[in-house]
Image: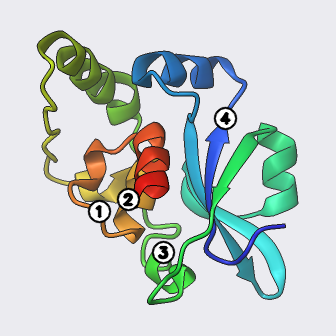
């Protein structure tokens, strides 16, 4: 089992995960955080139903992720950081399907690192890596991919 607040860098095995892996050039296709809540293991992540607290065993059985864990030293309880987002933030399908792939292709062609801009009302939607970047207080959370989160955690 993992320590409270551990970031879970996941390798998915679905068709969507394969697409994310191809577009981001990374095996890491999902990001989540492990939380002990009311004495039981949970994760908080963004899936198609938005940012939610989920039972860890059920989550792992459903998704069958291969996990690489990064323990984090937090100044504040990560559950408290995530709490304002839980249940109030939907999933950003537009970013996943349209905006991030376009950005990644343009970045590969030009060799630049373009920044996605947020539209009005977009703060009510997030991808998994944007959620993790938000609670880690990383700059421009909407620009992070799961692979970028993993690389950051292994170099800082």
Answer left or right for 113 relative to 15: left
Could one spot residue 127 in this view of the protein? no
Residue 138 is marked as: 1
Mark 4 or mark 2: which comes first in sequence?
A: 4
Q: Nearer the viewer, residue 113 or 47?
A: 113
All told, the count of numbered labels is 4
Q: Is residue 124 above or below residue 118?
A: below
**Badge 3: few (under 14), some or many (20 or more) residues near its Cα, within 10 Å?**
many
Q: CA distance from mark 1 to mark 2?
A: 5 Å
Q: Position of residue 71 (x, y in %)?
A: 62, 68
Q: CA distance from mark 4 to mark 3?
A: 22 Å
Task: Identify the residue at horizontal 25%, vertical 19% (top origin).
Answer: 102
Question: Which residue is the site of mark 3?
Answer: 82
Q: Secondary structure at mark 4?
A: strand
| Contact, mark 1 vs mark 3 (Cβ under 8 Å) | no
Q: CA distance from mark 4 to mark 2?
A: 18 Å
Question: Which residue is the site of mark 2?
Answer: 133
Q: Nearer the viewer, residue 145 or 81?
A: 145
| Contact, mark 4 vs mark 1 (Cβ under 8 Å) | no
Q: Secondary structure at mark 3?
A: helix
Answer left or right for 152 relative to 46: left
Q: Position of residue 110 (x, y in %)?
A: 12, 14
Q: Position of residue 12 (x, y in %)?
A: 68, 31
Q: CA distance from mark 1 to mark 3?
A: 14 Å
Question: Which residue is the site of mark 4?
Answer: 11
């Amino acid at each position: 089992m993992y320590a409270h607040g551990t970031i879970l860098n996941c390798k998915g095995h679905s068709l969507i995960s394969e697409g994310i892996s191809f577009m981001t050039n990374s095996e890491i296709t999902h990001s989540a955080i492990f939380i002990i809540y009311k004495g039981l293991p949970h994760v908080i992540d963004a899936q198609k139903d938005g940012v939610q607290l989920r039972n860890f065993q059920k989550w792992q059985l459903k998704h069958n992720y291969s996990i690489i864990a990064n323990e984090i030293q937090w100044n504040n309880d990560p559950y408290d950081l995530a709490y304002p987002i839980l249940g109030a933030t939907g999933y950003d399908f537009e970013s996943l399907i349209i905006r991030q792939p376009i950005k990644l292709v343009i970045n590969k062609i030009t060799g630049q690192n373009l920044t996605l801009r947020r539209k009005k009302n977009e703060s009510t939607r997030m991808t998994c890596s944007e959620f993790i970047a938000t609670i880690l207080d990383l700059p421009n959370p909407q620009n992070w991919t799961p692979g970028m989160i993993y690389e950051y955690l292994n170099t800082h």
